[in-house]
Amino acid sequence: MSSGDGRAPGPLLLLLLLLALPRSAGRRRAVVNRSIPDVCATCHIHATCQQSGGKSVCICNYGFVGNGRTHCQDKDECQIGASKICGNHTLCHNTHGSFYCVCLDGYRASNNNKTFIPNDGTNCTDIDECEESGLCGHNARCVNTEGSYMCYCNDGYKLETGEHSFHQDENNVSCKEIGCGSPPEMKNGYIVGNYSVQPGSAVHYECREGFYSNEGKFSYCTENGTWEPATLSCKEIDCGKPWLIPHTTMTWDNSTTLWSRVYYHCKEGYYFNGDKNFSECTMDQSWENITYVCEEEELFSNLSIFNETCVRWQKKTGRLGVQEMYTFHVQGQRWYQKNFFHEMTFELFTHKQAPEVCLDLQPGTNYSINISMVALNFSLLVSMTTQITDPPFPEVEFVAVKGSAPLLRLRKAEDQNGPISLYQVIVLPLDLQSTFICDSFAATTFFSNTTDIKGYVAAEFQAKDVADNMSIALGDRHYYGKFYNAPLKLGQEYCVFLKIISEWNKVRTQSCVIWAQIKNLSPSLQYMTAVGLGSVAAVCLVLFLSFSVARSCLHRSVHPPPAAVACEAVHLSTTVDVASAGIASLFLETESVSLL
């Protein structure tokens, strides 16, 4: 307030104000001091009061996050991933305020505890389940894997399910012994002897009587427990039509299978001359030969065969000087060539007392010749077998090469002049090509390291084993038949012959043809490498010997006698020459073949 005259308040008023101010201020200060709370008392139950900068601060405990006073919630340590917080091959489990780790199946903790917290270096290591005996059961083996294991059947066993591997704890399976069971049946065939059903075993088939086969007769049990299909095909034996015998009638049921029989009977006016009057179909698919002949009154005699294909006879005395007409009916067959049939008919007019006829017959053939005197209705049957002649020249593609051995292709020849038995590949030095005689290689000779080589048989093949357009590699070091396919020598020149051999009725014939010429045979890459290594070895040997000689000289004297120096030089030279010769001979072919 103010006085009525506008002056300043009086001293009394100021005093009253001063007395009032301290008391009021003191009361306000007392109220403020009572409102400051105790910080540590306000910390969350999962928080700890700590001093920081002279002040009390509430901090959430390990494993919790929050402001420390109003909330401290659990921290999920596993959310960053088990491999990051626990390590590899683990599972992470969060707990209230903490966590723990466990190893995956197939692993164990290095501290051998079921759970761990990776603050001491604990990690999870693989468990070798295969240490447990018999884990996979009988006839099986265990293979440990990372964190697990697998079971595999032993050799000779397989799973019933057909799977390759298994877990014994997942399904109840077992390994059963592999077996092919009963072999397949063969039409018109049967099994010979005993057999096994184990893999690799073979069963042998044969055709039953009356059937034949030229194909494979074995079936093999495979690793999969199945039988390979046999290539055997049994075909029924068929002899075809039987022989015709003049002046006979046949009793025959038209059967041409094995052991079929045809009976012959002489016509009226003829009599039987021979050992039996029937012929049977045999295993070689031909009718057996018989000497059954129906003869009339003898009109000519002294019949003989000469020069293999010629016949002569004596005419009846009572018809001397009379011109006779003879008819010839010729039939030829081959046992080795079923589709071959040679037939011809011709007439002969002659007044000679001792006629002679030479027939144009095919080689390697069985002939039946019926000679008839037309005027007297008289016939005579003659059997004749011609010898084989040289087989046809081999059909080859001539090859001329330089530097390397060629790959030759063999074409199968036809049985034209007799049954072809063998094929031979013959190697000669090129300078002997003009002097080669096909018969000179008839002897059987093996490859030898001791004889002087002039030529040799490199390979021999049975005709039945030769496929058309078959490949032959010269010098492959294999045996073909009884002969060794020797490697060709470097720098040499060769000529190669192909020989075809026929054998029948104790007669052997052959034909040869030049197949290839090889010039300037050069070494292969492997040979050049070997020679290079040999040269390096020779140089090293020379250096070593030089060092040895020098060292020996130092130990003798400072001024050795000239004779000693010369001796050492000769010795060193000889050593080097021997070493060089040894190195050279090491990489050259030293094999040779016997001269036939």
Image (spheres, rainbow, N blue to C red):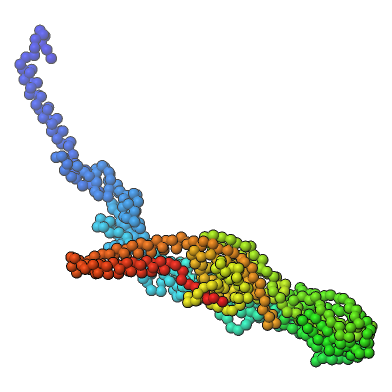
**Residue 418's x, y, as percent?**
71, 76
Q: Quadrant of the C terminus?
A: bottom right
Q: Is residue 307 above or below residue 471?
A: below
Determine if residue 331 is in view: no
Left or right of residue 230, residue 368 in this image: right
**Residue 561's x, y, as percent?**
21, 68
| Image quarter of residue 218 | bottom right
Residue occupying the point 49% across, 76% down: 451
Closer to the camera, 155 or 150? 155
How many marks are shown on the rendered structure? 0
Tell which residue pokes out farthest to the top in this image. 5
Left or right of residue 144, residue 12 in this image: left
Q: Quadrant of the N terminus?
A: top left
| Image quarter of residue 461 | bottom right
Residue occupying the point 63% across, 73% down: 438
**Residue 346's x, y, as percent?**
87, 76
Left or right of residue 69, residue 447 in this image: right
| Image quarter of residue 108 | bottom left
Q: Is residue 49 above or below residue 418?
A: above
Residue occupying the point 33% across, 62% down: 539
Closer to the camera, 229 or 529? 529
**Residue 531's x, y, as percent?**
41, 63
Determine if residue 503 is in view: yes
Residue occupying the point 54% across, 76% down: 595
Tell which residue pokes out farthest to the left in this image. 11
